[in-house]
Amino acid sequence: MRFLLMLISRVSLLGGLSLLLLNPAHATQETIQNLDASLRSPRTLKEANLTAQDLTPLLPTQPTAVEPTPADAGTPADSSSSTFTYRPLPPQVGASFTTGPGVGYESSFGSIEGFVPLVQTPGKEIGYVQGRLNLDTAADPGGNLLLGYRAFNPATNTVLGGYLGFDIRSTGNQTVSQLGAGIEAILPAVELRLNGYLPVGNRSREIASSSVFTDSITATSSAPRFQGNFLVVGGQSLRTTQTTRLFEDSLAGFDAEAGVKVARWSPVGTLKSYLGLYYYGSPRVDGFVGVRGRLEARINENFRAGLSIQGDREFGTTAAVSVAFSFPGIGSSSTAPQQLAWAEAGNFVFRQSTVAVTQRRTTDIATASTGTGIIALLNPATNQPWFFQHVALGGAAGSGTFEAPFSTVESGLAATRGDRNDIVYVQAGSNPGIPAFTIPANVQVLSAGITQQIQTVQQGLTPLPLSGSGILPGVTGTVTLGNNTTLAGFNITPPIGNVGILANGVQDITIRQNQVAVAGGSTNGIQLQNVTSTATVIGNTVATNSFESNGIFISSNANSAITTATVSDNIITTTGNFARGIFIVPNNSAIATLTVSGNTITTSGDFADGIALLLDNNSSITTATISGNTVTTTGADANGINTELQGGSSIASFRLTNNQIPQSGLNNVRIANFGGQTICAAIQGNLAQNPGAGGVNFDLLSGFPLVVLFRVIDLPNLNTNNNGGTFQYDFVGLPTANYVNVASCP
């Protein structure tokens, strides 16, 4: 009753105060004194005219539940208490930094983010908005906005939630955006998440392009003709445009992960491990699957750090490190287990923080006609036009064009440029006789007397107009070859004692379809001395008529090495002692591949072998093939085919096949090993008959009977394989222990 009277007196006091404020002019001194006394608060129950009994009815009959205070930070409250009061989740602000490159992005980026509860029932549910602003190290901005809902079950301390979102990003080339959605389940023992991403707008955009133009002319008629210094055909001008475009595509996809706690060092501090999959694709990019593993350490209520490693076929294997700060942070209001479980509903959503993009490059090629005309045929070795210096012997002196040719070979040679495109093309004309000349490096000298063909880019093997006349221009002196030169189609008759064709200390030479006749002792028709790289001698007709005048002579010393030597389809006639048809003499040098094939050889002097190989002083031939030749020798002690090794020399693989030796002055085939290394020979399909007095069809000869010097394929069957009739062997100084029958050579 007294508590009620006190309340009434306070109401009366408020009424007097109101009167004083509304009408201060009517206030009396007594009123003011009464008001002053009323404003003085009673200091005791007695001054308030109250007793403890008066207050008892107003006190609550039971106490109000309050949050228990743990004895220390590591002791959780009793989670079974039904009186626990959950506190509202506060807004969160934070900053983070994530390294790049990663899935769908190249540069590291920093972020500022916020989490704001919109509505919540503490301990039950929360609706929220989350925003993020990104800025990468290339100064390209981006961000996202999420609207989400989470429900909390206090009985199981479980959070279930979902969200809808919108992302936007500048890549530096374009602005891309996407819609997002996700669901999550945060349980005491495990966390589960599923996020989806769907780009909107133009998903593929061309961000760069470049074009390269190539002008060309293609032949429209197959009949070549000369014009000026060029070999030309009718053609069409074309322009080929190669356009390269670079596209940037935004990727649609999803990611999913599951995680568990692996360590706890405080009520808030935890280490979690996650493993998940992701899938992305676009209309231009085939879909691909990746695997991601990550660790997240919540150091305290404010700081987080993370490491993720992911791999897929589009972006390869990448690793990203992230650090983050948030305020006030999880556990800032309470470390009670119930509140910490509920506080998980106030965490930032974990998802791809930026729109994923990738790039694709395409190349388009288009060709269009730009006109018609003539085109010069190109040399495949240089991709430049062949350049002809025309010569009409005995005619008026011109400039070397087809319309105004030079009158001498010397003039044509002097006009060459040495760029591997020069051809001196000689018409016989009145053919007064060409004096001796030297071919400069990288030049071909061709006559129209034989059919001439050259390789061209546009038409492949192309015949030269006017060639094949049958009239070979005559040369009255020695023709000397330089590096990378060709001589074809000449009739060479030098003075007595002079070599017909000479190549000395040069490389890459071709001697083709010439007629050579020389006279005088020790004078070779074609002489290659210390030639390196490639040497080709084909289709020539060679005649010599004196002592030691060989048809084709190839010698080399320690300063030369031939990779490929070819002597084929020549017709060789020699008259004179020691005048061999083909004589190959490596001395302390090497030939990688030697081919002597298809030649027709006739010799009529003593010791004038048809084909002779003499290796001395550690010389070597890796592969020697003597095949398809027809050899006749009539002089005393003249072997058809004679091979001799001395001074540690070797022939690793020796093939002697399909030769015809109808007559020889001594042995049809002689292989002698005097101090060389072991020879491995395949001797098959030869026709060898009528050896000379004291000779045999096949003679293995050795001066060192204590070493195995011969490995011969199918030696016991030489009779049948070589079709030699009564085939005789003569193993002079060669016990059977010094040869071995083998199936093949190295």
Image (cartoon, rainbow, N blue to C red):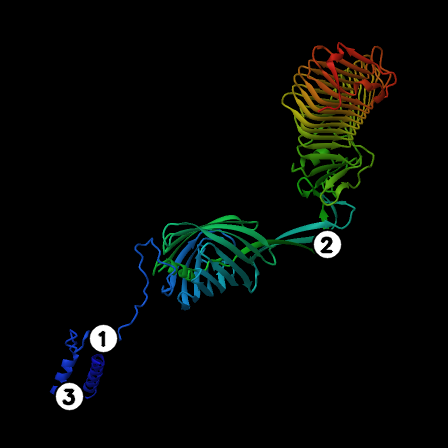
414 versus 60 height, above or below: above
Q: At which x and y percent is residue 168?
A: 49, 62
Identify the residue under disc 3. Answer: 27
Give the amino acid type for the residue marked by disc 1 in the picture.
Leu
Identify the residue under disc 2. Answer: 372
Q: Secondary structure at mark 3?
A: loop
Which badge, 2 or 3, comes first in the chain's sequence?
3
Q: Secondary structure at mark 1?
A: helix
318 versus 390 height, above or below: below
Give the amino acid type for the residue marked by disc 3 in the picture.
Ala
Give the amino acid type for the residue marked by disc 2 in the picture.
Thr
Residue 55 bears which disc, if any?
1
The alpha-carbon separation of the residues under discs 1 and 3 comes to 35 Å
The alpha-carbon separation of the residues under discs 2 and 3 comes to 120 Å
Which badge, 1 or 2, comes first in the chain's sequence?
1
Residue 743, quarter of picture: top right
Mark in the foreground, 2 or 3 = 3
Identify the residue shown where x is 54% and y is 50%: 291
Q: Is 119 left, or right, of 473 in this rendering?
A: left
Q: Secondary structure at mark 2?
A: strand
Q: In the rendered image, which quarter contains the C terminus?
A: top right
Q: At which x and y percent is residue 348?
A: 43, 60
Q: At which x and y percent is residue 677?
A: 68, 17
Mark 1, Cα crowd under 10 Å, few <14 / some 14-19 / many 20+, is few
Q: Is residue 45 visible?
A: yes
Q: Is 36 left, or right, of 703 in this rendering?
A: left
121 versus 646 height, above or below: below
Mark 3, Cα crowd under 10 Å, few <14 / some 14-19 / many 20+, is few
